[in-house]
Each structure stands twice: as C-alpha cells, then as structure tokens.
Image (spheres, rainbow, N blue to C red):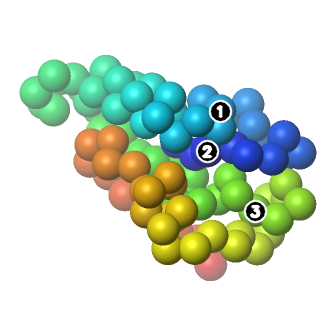
C-alpha cells in the first residue's frame, strides 16, 4: 500500500489515500484477510509498490522521490504483516 500526496500521480486509484493512519489500518486488515488468520489458509500478500513510490516528484511514475529518513520511516514504512517481498526490476 502506498500513501498518495499528489493527486497528479497516475496510480491514485491504487491507494487508500493520503492519511498514514487510515492507509495503515486498511493495509493491515487487507493483508490479514488475504493471508488468513493463521497464515496457512490464505495466500501470501505482497506489497504493491516500493517504499515511498507514491511520493514521486510531479506525480510522475518512476520519478525522483525526495523523502527524509523520518518521513520514510514514520509515514511510509508500514509493517502490514505481508509475508512476501516485492521483487525488483532493473
């Protein structure tokens, strides 16, 4: 899940909004629902976007992101319980 702070970003519809608390609650509930209560009855959840991806400059995909360590850890780094990491691409 990602925070969206710029409505020009082309993936706004893939997020729960700009409020870190709201996004965190929805993300934890979604992951819990997908993976099941014990982690054995559902499927593995994977984070959709890379950390801070929704904070790109100018609302562009694959653009520069300027986030300080505090904003990154306090607002964007979410411990949702997802058990599968997002693979990268080069």
Q: Do the residues labelled 1 and 2 touch (CB within 8 Å)?
A: yes
Per the image, the residue denoted by label 2 is 3
Per the image, the residue denoted by label 1 is 17
Residue 42 seen from this side: yes
**Which structural element holds mark 1?**
loop
State the residue at coordinates (69%, 43%): 4
As drawn, the residue found furthest toward the bottom would be 90
Is 8 placed left or right of 6 in the picture?
A: right
The CA distance from mark 2 to mark 3 is 11 Å
Residue 87 seen from this side: no
Above or below: residue 58 compared with residue 89: above
Task: Give the mark nearer the N terminus: 2 vs 3.
Answer: 2
Q: Please count the marks in the image.
A: 3
The CA distance from mark 1 to mark 3 is 15 Å
| Residue 2, numbered label | none
Per the image, the residue denoted by label 3 is 56
The CA distance from mark 1 to mark 2 is 6 Å
Q: Which of 34 and 8 is in front in this view?
A: 8
């Amino acid at each position: 899940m990602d925070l969206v702070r710029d409505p020009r970003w082309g993936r706004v519809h893939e997020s729960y909004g700009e409020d870190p608390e709201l996004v965190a609650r929805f993300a934890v509930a979604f992951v819990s629902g997908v993976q099941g209560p014990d982690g054995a009855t559902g499927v593995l959840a994977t984070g959709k976007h890379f950390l801070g991806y929704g904070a790109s400059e100018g609302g562009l995909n694959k653009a520069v992101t300027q986030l300080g360590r505090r904003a990154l850890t306090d607002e964007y780094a979410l411990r949702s319980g997802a058990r599968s990491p997002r693979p990268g691409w080069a």
